[in-house]
């Protein structure tokens, strides 16, 4: 078994995949590293690029080639399940690592800190077309990521939300598996992972920049059609209920407020689609999720709005 399995998912990354793979191949370690590459039926030449690299490095690259498109979460979970190393590193096919010592340093950190399940580091975010100047995650999330080494707890993850560059993560396989069944229906694989990995230990942060996080039109998560946003909201409502079960009760309020916003948005979008019954249900969930005081406040506002409509005032 390899010491580190690099879990890499890719779809329509023909312009980027070679750079990602090369950044794995350049790693200098005193242990074995395998690249487990899940190619999700791309419509461009991504699969051929992956096959070419696998032929050149058959002892270092293992390909997963599904016969039909699995989607982001399906491909991610399948590639994770196939990663057998003691440690798992994450790298998406449109990102890349910049330091040849990245994996060695992070594994050394985890060996020296048995109370940590995960090691992360700073990264640079950049727009592929240079339309936006690059910036560091430590600048973007300056209230969270310090200029010095630090351990983050599950409480930090619950409080601050998503702030971890995916390509910076190296974690103990034993801290994640078995993966709970509900994760298969989640929207955010990254954030679900952050909370799951901090069930039994902390996350160790290194302030060094050792990866680049690429933004491009094909990689930015977006949903412009109402039906797509409704489907996304449904998944986020589902996963957030599980997030609450994982964290200490003192952090439930943050997730309740997020649920409130999701249900309000879902109610408006379902009403727009003509689904009034589901719209009313989500409105009720929105005004009741935070607590009795918030429910009463919303009902008073609603009654006042109805009064204005009836009286014309």
Image (tube, rainbow, N blue to C red):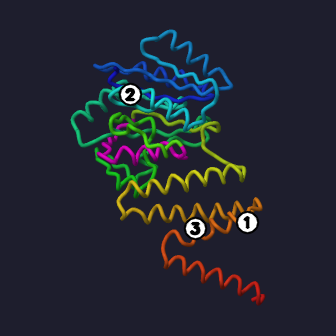
Q: Residue at x 64, y 60 (%)?
A: 266
Q: Nearer the viewer, residue 186 or 130?
A: 186
Cα–Cα gap, marks 1 and 2: 54 Å
Label 3 SS: helix
Q: Could you tell me which quadrant the N terminus lies in? A: top left
Q: Residue 259 at what x, y percent from top left?
A: 53, 62
Q: Position of residue 75 (x, y in %)?
A: 55, 32
In the rendered view, does 281 fall on the left or right side of 138?
Answer: right
Say what secondary structure mark 1 lies in.
Answer: helix
Dot 2: what SS? loop
Looking at the rendering, in which quadrant would you find the C terminus?
bottom right
Can residue 34 be found in the magenta stretch? no
75 is higher (above) or lower (below) than 245: above
The Cα atoms of the two marked residues, 2 and 3, are separated by 48 Å
Marker count (numbered): 3
Within 10 Å of disc 2 (Cα), the crowding (few <14, some 14-19, many 20+) is some
Foreground residue, 155 or 168? 155
In this view, the residue in front, 178 or 113, is 178
Residue interval drawn in magenta? 185-209
| Residue occupied by mark 1 | 276
Q: Which residue is mark 3?
A: 285
Residue 99 image label? 2
Q: Quadrant of residue 206?
A: top left
Of labels 2 and 3, the one closer to you: 3
What is the x, y in percent for residue 160? 42, 56
Task: Identify which residue is drawn at 47% across, 34% down.
Answer: 212
Q: Is residue 233 above or below residue 89?
A: below
Q: Is residue 129 above or below residue 288?
A: above
Pointer 1: residues within 10 angstroms few (<14), some, or many (20+)? some
* Among the two numbered marks 1 and 2 on one chain, the one whose residue lies closer to the N terminus: 2
- Residue 68 in percent (x, y) is at 64, 27
Q: CA distance from mark 3 to mark 1?
A: 14 Å
């Amino acid at each position: 078994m390899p010491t580190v399995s690099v879990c890499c998912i890719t779809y329509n990354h023909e312009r980027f995949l070679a750079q990602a793979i090369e950044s794995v191949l350049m790693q200098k370690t005193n242990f074995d590293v395998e690249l487990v590459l899940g190619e999700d039926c791309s419509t461009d030449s991504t699969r051929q690029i992956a096959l070419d690299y696998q032929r050149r490095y058959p002892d270092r690259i293992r390909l997963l080639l599904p016969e039909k498109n699995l989607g982001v979460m399906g491909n991610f979970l399948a590639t994770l399940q196939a990663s057998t190393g003691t440690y798992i590193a994450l790298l998406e096919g449109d990102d890349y690592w910049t330091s040849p010592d990245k994996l060695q340093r992070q594994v050394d950190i985890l060996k020296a800190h048995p109370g940590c399940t995960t090691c992360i580091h700073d990264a640079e975010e950049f727009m592929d077309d240079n339309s936006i100047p690059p910036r560091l995650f430590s600048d973007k999330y300056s209230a969270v990521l310090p200029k010095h080494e630090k351990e983050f707890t599950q409480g930090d993850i619950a409080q601050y939300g998503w702030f971890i560059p995916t390509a910076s993560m190296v974690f103990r396989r034993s801290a994640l598996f078995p993966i709970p069944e509900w994760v298969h229906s989640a929207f955010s694989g990254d954030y679900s992972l952050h909370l799951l990995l901090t069930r039994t230990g902390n996350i160790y942060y290194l302030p060094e920049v050792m990866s680049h996080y690429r933004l491009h039109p094909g990689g930015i998560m977006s949903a412009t059609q109402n039906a797509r946003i409704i489907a996304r909201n449904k998944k986020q409502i589902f996963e957030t209920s599980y997030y609450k079960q994982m964290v200490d009760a003192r952090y439930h309020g943050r997730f309740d407020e997020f649920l409130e916003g999701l249900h309000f948005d879902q109610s408006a979008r379902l009403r727009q689609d003509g689904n009034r019954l589901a719209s009313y249900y989500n409105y009720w969930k929105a005004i009741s999720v935070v607590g009795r005081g918030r429910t009463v406040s919303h009902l008073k506002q609603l009654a006042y709005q109805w009064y204005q409509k009836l009286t014309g005032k």
